[in-house]
Image (spheres, rainbow, N blue to C red):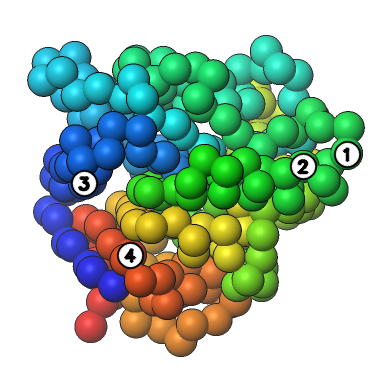
Amino acid sequence: MEVIIVERPQDAAPIVADACTSLLSAKPAAVLGLATGSTPLPVYAELVRRHREEGLTFAAARAFLLDEYVGLAADHPERYRAVIERDFTGHVDLDPAAVVGPDGLAEDLAAAGPAYDDAIRAAGGIDLQILGIGVDGHLAFNMPMSSLASRTRLKTLTPRTREDNARFFDGDLDRVPTHCLTQGLGTIMESRHAVVLGFGRAKAQAVRECVEGAISAHWPASVLQLHPHATVVVDAEAASQLA
Ligand code: F6R
């Protein structure tokens, strides 16, 4: 596991964007794994800048999202497929049809998880997976005590997650979905290069447990210690509890 400590979150953006740029230049049809949330936003902004100013192209690339809410209408602005388009993919030349997330509107939600893992495999697997770490060490919607071997599957959102996310639904808890489909930790572990980002003091304990703690379902991101190519990029505050 490689750990890169930068001064400020915006200093992480060129580092991760460089990994993405080299990948795309070596393999234009690369498969990207994209997280939503606030942490990767500086990286996405830098990739958009490189696309606009330096000709970085995603025209042949594909992207898979980490997770999706269950039951939000296809045109709901808080669907993660809509969020990633606003935050990133809609501002570059990625073919919209090549950006997919788990099908939160599937009739058979139990089958939608394995179908998503099959789609990732059929695309050749994820070359570069961008991840944000949660305060409690979660990755995607794999909260503490998720199986380290888990696959993409239906999960119940915890009361804490629903409360945290109510801000995206006008503060109305009743409008926050109760379930999600999320890539499993085992699925994430199959990516060829996993880049996990963490910024701010609130993430410091999770970063410490991820990098230096015991590998345990108590801190799901700690499973990345077993990943053959994991890069942790954190700012000084998030790194403040590292030995
Ligand atoms: C996003 C996701 C989540 C976030 C995590 C950190 O697709 O699955 O695991 O990466 O909750 O969120 P932020 O970046 O908003 O602190």
Q: Residue at x 60, y 72 (%)?
A: 148
Density class for disc 4 (Cα within 10 Å; few <14, some 14-19, many ≥20) is: many
User: Assess mark 2: CB under 8 A from ligand 1?
Assistant: no
Q: Amino acid at mark 1?
A: Asp
Q: Which residue is mark 1?
A: 108
Element on which disc 1 rests: loop
* Label 3 sits on residue: 19
Of the numbered discs 4 and 2, the one sitting upstream in the chain is 2
2 and 1 marks in contact (CB < 8 Å): yes
What residue did someone put label 2 on? 112
Give whichever of discs 1 and 3 has the lower sequence position.
3
Which residue is label 4 attached to? 230
Question: Left of 159 or right of it: where is 167?
Answer: left
Where residue 121 sits: x, y (%)?
57, 49
At label 4, which amino acid type do we have? Ala
Answer with left or right where residue 109 lies relative to residue 148: right
Label 3 with label 4: CB-CB less than 8 Å: no
Q: Is residue 4 above or below residue 82?
A: below
In the figure, residue 56 lies in which quadrant? top left
Q: Amino acid at mark 2?
A: Ala
- Element carrying mark 2: helix
- For the N terminus, the quadrant is bottom left
| Residue occupying the point 49% across, 17% down | 96
Q: Position of residue 90 (x, y in %)?
A: 41, 15
Near-viewer residue (89 or 220): 89
Question: Which element carries disc 3, helix, strand or loop?
Answer: helix
Q: Are marks 1 and 3 in contact (CB under 8 Å)?
A: no
